Image (cartoon, rainbow, N blue to C red):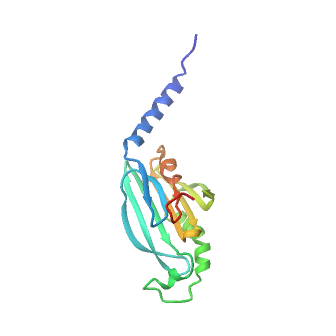
Amino acid sequence: MYLINLKGVVGALFLLLSTSQVIAQDWHSYFDQDERFVINMPGEPEITEFYYPTEWGGNLPAKLYSINTGNVDYRLTVVNYGTDETAYVQVADHTDDDFPWLYDFRGSIAFAARNIREKNEGEITFDNWHHIEMVEGHQIQVTHQDGTRTYASIYLYEEEGRLFIIEARGPSNGLYQGIFQQSLHFLDEDGQRV
């Protein structure tokens, strides 16, 4: 005779219910060939263009892809550093032709990570180097006083001069860190994954 493990049954039901909430959302692969990426998103994002202030004084063109659904705030920021210093001199409001572009570019992951740490009050529960498809990056997880969590990742796709900053904040039992945060893929000029 077999005994039924009540905790196991309850755990399986909880997992099924929490997974069905995620599946109920309109998750799909969002593709942007111009910015060279594909990522899972729970719907169509709102896209906002702006200038991203860099550590060494640059203001670079950037796009924010954002969605707020199911008590989770999803944000992907793509900063166009370009592949050489011409990205700086093409920005109309810059004041110095001598930007240290290489320092800014190479330090962009560390700078973005510092910004995430500073703006997210709470306990940092993970803070470490990471990569996707051999594109170097960094991941940070923060547990906030209200019980929500922020899952953030930063990746520098050097060949295309793009910095990707991924942030998702929501309930601690959400699955969005895997479905969104770790779903980024990089594309080459032909739209193929690298």
- Which corner quadrant of the image does residue 109 belong to? bottom right
Residue name at image x 60 percent, y 60 percent: 138
Q: Is residue 98 above or below residue 166?
A: below
Which quadrant, please, contains the C terminus?
bottom right
Which quadrant, please, contains the N terminus?
top right
Residue 108 can be seen in this image: yes
Q: 102 or 124, which is in the foreground?
A: 102
- Residue 105 picture location, percent across and down: 58, 74
Return the residue found at the far front: 190
Residue 143 can be seen in this image: no
Residue name at image x 45 percent, y 47 percent: 171
Q: How many marks?
A: 0
**Left or right: 41 in relation to 107:** left
- Residue 44 picture location, percent across and down: 36, 55
Q: Is residue 118 above or below residue 177?
A: below
- Which corner quadrant of the image does residue 85 belong to? bottom right
**Left or right: 45 in relation to 12:** left
Q: Is residue 59 above or below residue 157?
A: below
- Residue 117 picture location, percent across and down: 55, 63
- Residue 150 picture location, percent across and down: 49, 55
